[in-house]
Image (cartoon, rainbow, N blue to C red):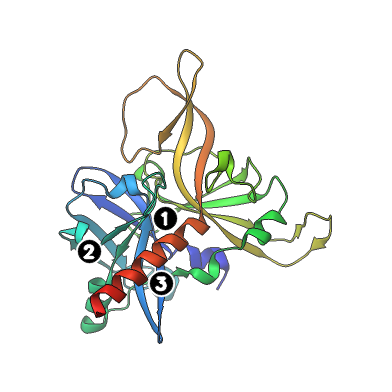
Amino acid sequence: MDKLDLLSKSTIKIHCDNNTSGTGFFFNFDIGAGNHVPTIITNRHVMENVGDIKLTFSLNDYFSSSQRIVEKHEINYTNVQQQVVYHSDPEVDLCAIKIVPIIQFQFDSKKEFQITHLDMRNIPSDEELENLRFVEDIVMVGYPNGLSDVKNNLPIFRRGSTATHPGVDFEGKPECIIDMTVTPGSSGSPVFIHNSNGFMDKKGTINMSERLIFLGVNKAVYTMSTLGEIIEIPSPTRFVTNSNIGINLGIIVKAKAIKDIEQQIIEEIKTLNL
């Protein structure tokens, strides 16, 4: 299957009980001995002060259905804070929602959720990022303005480019800037460097293969106030009324920040096994 087609199954819309929504994507953490912890990665600000969330899973692929009908299963995930692992640095806008009970339900009920997950093997090394060019083509997968193909339970893809070098930590933080319109509901959307028809590397060598690199997670957007001041605000999870003007620059938490959450989950499991 095409890589972008697979990514269409990597995200899920998170409906929160405080009347907000955001994007999450499936990520498996390897905890050794052939075991893993399935999670949904999203932004810290999406999940803070949330009690319950609603998730809708597809039970079949659109193209595998002779009638082109997608069957869905809705899950209300209650007391969700018990399952949330926030990044240990409060300045890093990331968290993971453990979904072990949901996956166990899938197996017990013999349902087949249409899920594509990422894992630590998808996180690029610093060297790999440093060898990229300053400006690279990117795609974001998620639910801008809360929009999705509700009938077929599919996300929205958007294209843009990097605006700062992917291998440089912007302002010394594990972040980079992208040139793309970021709107409410995009919080938590995974962002990938993608070239379908070949690419040129930093040395000018042309490679004709398809390339997909997990860059990071959208967290915020730069806006300009009516006084001309540039302001960073969290990518909103619902429509709000303000007089700020978007300048089409989004802020991405780099994928490498997920490594900290992995260590937190491993340490948590070690503690439980004592």
**Dot 2 surroundings within 10 Å: few (below 14), some, or many (20 or more)?**
few
Q: Secondary structure at mark 3?
A: strand
Image height of 163 relative to 59, above or below? above
> Which residue is farthest front?
274
On the image, numbered disc 3 is attached to which residue?
29
Residue 109 appears in which quarter of the rendering?
Answer: bottom left
Give the residue number, with chain letter if any, for mark 1. 155
Secondary element under disc 1, as helix, strand or loop, is loop
Q: Position of residue 260 (x, y in %)?
A: 43, 60
Give the residue number, with chain letter if any, for mark 2: 74
Q: For this view, does 51 lie left or right of residue 188? A: left
Residue that lies at the very extreme toward the right in this rendered image:
204
Q: What residue is at 65 percent from the left and 56 percent from the top?
A: 129
Above or below 35: residue 261: above
* Residue 179 in sight from this viewpoint: no
Q: Secondary structure at mark 2?
A: strand
Quadrant in the picture for residue 273? bottom left
Count neighbours of disc 1 (C-alpha within 10 A) and say few if under 14, some if 14 to 19, many if 20 or more: many
- Where does the image place residue 227, in percent across and percent down from the top left? 47, 12
Query: Label 3, label 1: how many angstroms apart (C-alpha)?
Result: 23 Å
The amino acid at mark 2 is: Glu
Q: How many marks?
A: 3
What amino acid does circle 1 point to? Answer: Pro
Q: Is residue 117 above or below residue 236?
A: below
Measured in 3D between alpha carbons, the distance from the residue under mark 3 to the one under mark 2, in whole angstroms, is 24 Å
Query: Do callouts 3 and 2 mark residues in contact (Cβ within 8 Å)?
Result: no
Sequence order check: which comes first, mark 2 or mark 1?
2
Q: Residue at x 41, y 72 (%)?
A: 29
Residue ranking furthest to the bottom = 33
